[in-house]
């Protein structure tokens, strides 16, 4: 895959299954706490997010290989299919979020997810707060990062 092969576009409800597949595969491959919701619940929840007012963009080549879900102030999800990792998909999606929200945004990342923390830090996000995880569903320590 080259940068010219990658297309970023707004997600549609027809992308729900592909977005959920990326989400589930990426989470399973990442050093993150175990999921607290069954796969079917995740699929239904993500399908609902596609029509909820969140911005959801997909990255695709011959298929959806990543997605970002965000609001005016938060990057809620940025997931890349493990088969497409390291090929610029995450960077392209993060650059899109930065361009759409130049005044900044925040995100939460699990302390255990060192690859994601390094990815965000290398792209200018700054650690602002650490928690013990008491406020998230997984009850796992996390970090709030912001850009700029």
Image (cartoon, rainbow, N blue to C red):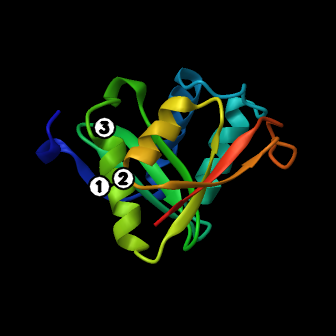
- Residue 29 vertical placement versus 24 (above, below): above
Mark 3 neighbour class, 10 Å CA radius: few under 14, some 14 to 19, many 20 or more = few
Mark 1 neighbour class, 10 Å CA radius: few under 14, some 14 to 19, many 20 or more = some
Residue that label 1 marks: 8
Residue 81, percent from left and from top: 41, 31
Residue shown at the point (85%, 49%) measured from the top left: 135
- Badges 1 and 2: C-beta atoms under 8 Å apart? yes
Tell me which numbered mark, 1 or 2, is placed earlier along the sequence: 1
Q: Quadrant of residue 18?
A: top left
Q: Which mark is residue 100?
A: none
Query: Foreground residue, 104 or 13?
Result: 104
Residue 144, percent from left and from top: 65, 53
Which dot, 1 or 2, sits closer to the camera? 2
Mark 2 neighbour class, 10 Å CA radius: few under 14, some 14 to 19, many 20 or more = many
Residue that label 2 marks: 93
Residue that label 3 marks: 63
Q: Is residue 19 left or right of residue 33?
A: left
Alpha-carbon span between mark 1 and mark 3: 11 Å
Alpha-carbon span between mark 2 and mark 3: 15 Å
SS at circle 3: loop
SS at circle 1: strand
Tell me which numbered mark, 1 or 3, is placed earlier along the sequence: 1
Alpha-carbon span between mark 1 and mark 2: 8 Å
Which dot, 1 or 3, sits closer to the camera? 1
Residue shown at the point (80%, 46%) measured from the top left: 136
Q: Is residue 13 left or right of residue 73?
A: left
Query: Foreground residue, 17 or 7?
Result: 7
Residue 74, percent from left and from top: 58, 64
Residue 137, percent from left and from top: 81, 42
Q: Is residue 6 left or right of residue 57?
A: left
Q: Is residue 28 left or right of residue 147?
A: right
């Amino acid at each position: 895959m080259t940068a010219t092969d990658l297309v970023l576009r707004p997600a549609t409800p027809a992308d729900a299954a592909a977005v959920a597949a990326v989400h589930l595969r990426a989470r399973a491959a990442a050093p993150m706490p175990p999921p607290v919701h069954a796969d079917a619940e995740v699929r239904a929840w993500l399908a609902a997010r596609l029509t909820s007012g969140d911005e959801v963009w997909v990255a695709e080549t011959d298929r959806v290989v990543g997605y970002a879900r965000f609001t005016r102030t938060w990057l809620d999800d940025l997931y890349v299919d493990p088969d497409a990792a390291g090929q610029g998909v995450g960077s392209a999606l993060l650059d899109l979020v930065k361009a759409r929200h130049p005044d900044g945004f925040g995100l939460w990342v699990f302390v255990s997810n060192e690859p994601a923390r390094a990815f965000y830090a290398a792209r200018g996000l700054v650690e602002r707060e650490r928690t013990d995880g008491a406020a998230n569903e997984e009850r796992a320590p996390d970090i709030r990062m912001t850009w700029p």
